[in-house]
Image (spheres, rainbow, N blue to C red):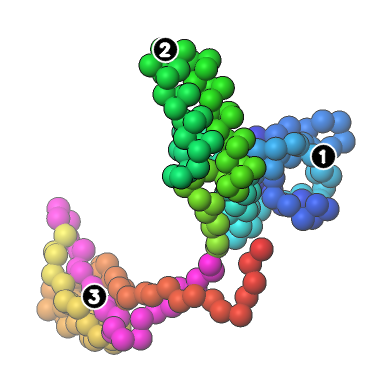
Amino acid sequence: MEPGTLVYDPHTRKVGEYQDRTGPYVMLRPVGGGREWQADPARIREATPEERLSAGVRALNDRSREGLSADPTRPPSPVPGCATCEDLALRRDRARAAFDGSAVTDANVLLRQHQHAEHGGESTGRRIFRYVPYTIVQDASALPEYEAYCVSGEEEDCGAGSGPCGAPGEVEEWQRRHTQETRHLRYRRSFADYAVLEQVTGRSVP
């Protein structure tokens, strides 16, 4: 198993990134970072697309609850009307003007700590991401289309086509007529329809 592969650990009921094997165990790391844990290699399996997506959403929510943005390198912005935020932002601006990178970093750390304690995160607000499952179904309001092209020929394809048809039987009838007229036997057939995504209801996603 390659490092970084997302796997599901039924013991912890969590999805983790496969890191390496250590003795009789494998090491998994939480999606989005965190403390690694040991898992039984005989019980883990590759995570399903739904499990991977759910784990990614949970990691984003965890970062938001901790007052972190999707980009942790982005400097925090002061909350309008908060004197402490404005004071720390002013301190940071003065440090920037003096080309004092260490003081800029200190001001950002203090501003993040203050916002986490007093405002529940950064001034941009906490963003909670929710995974909503959908299913793909054929659009009943639009008819599907069937079509065939003649690809017979020694040097180049014939290129004759049936044009869009509303049923496969119409395409087959055109093929039979074309073969009778030309003795061509090879066709490329295509099918096209319209699809819509419908939200799955009555289901809870962690």
116 or 139: nearer the eye?
Answer: 116
> Percent x, y for residue 45?
72, 51
What secondary structure is marked by label 3?
A: strand
Q: Sequence order check: which comes first, mark 3 or mark 2?
A: 2
Name the residue rendered at 47%, 39% in the picture. 78
Q: Are marks 2 and 1 in contact (CB under 8 Å)?
A: no
Name the residue rendered at 42%, 73% in the picture. 197
Say which amino acid is labelled 2: Phe
Name the residue rendered at 14%, 55% in the picture. 156
Q: Sequence order check: which comes first, mark 3 or mark 1?
A: 1
> Percent x, y for residue 188?
27, 67
Say which amino acid is labelled 1: Gln
Name the residue rendered at 46%, 24% in the picture. 92
Q: Quadrant of the N terminus?
A: top right
Q: Are marks 3 and 2 in contact (CB under 8 Å)?
A: no
> As displayed, is residue 171 above or below residue 192?
below
Q: Are marks 3 and 1 in contact (CB under 8 Å)?
A: no
124 or 186: nearer the eye?
Answer: 124
For mark 3, what is the residue? 147
Q: Can residue 172 be seen?
A: no
For mark 2, what is the residue? 99
For mark 1, what is the residue? 38
- Viewed as shown, does residue 26 lie left or right of 47? right
- Callout 1 environment at 10 Å: few (<14), some (14 to 19), or many (20+)? some
> Percent x, y for residue 184?
19, 70
> Percent x, y for residue 202?
61, 80
Viewer-side label of 3, 2: 2
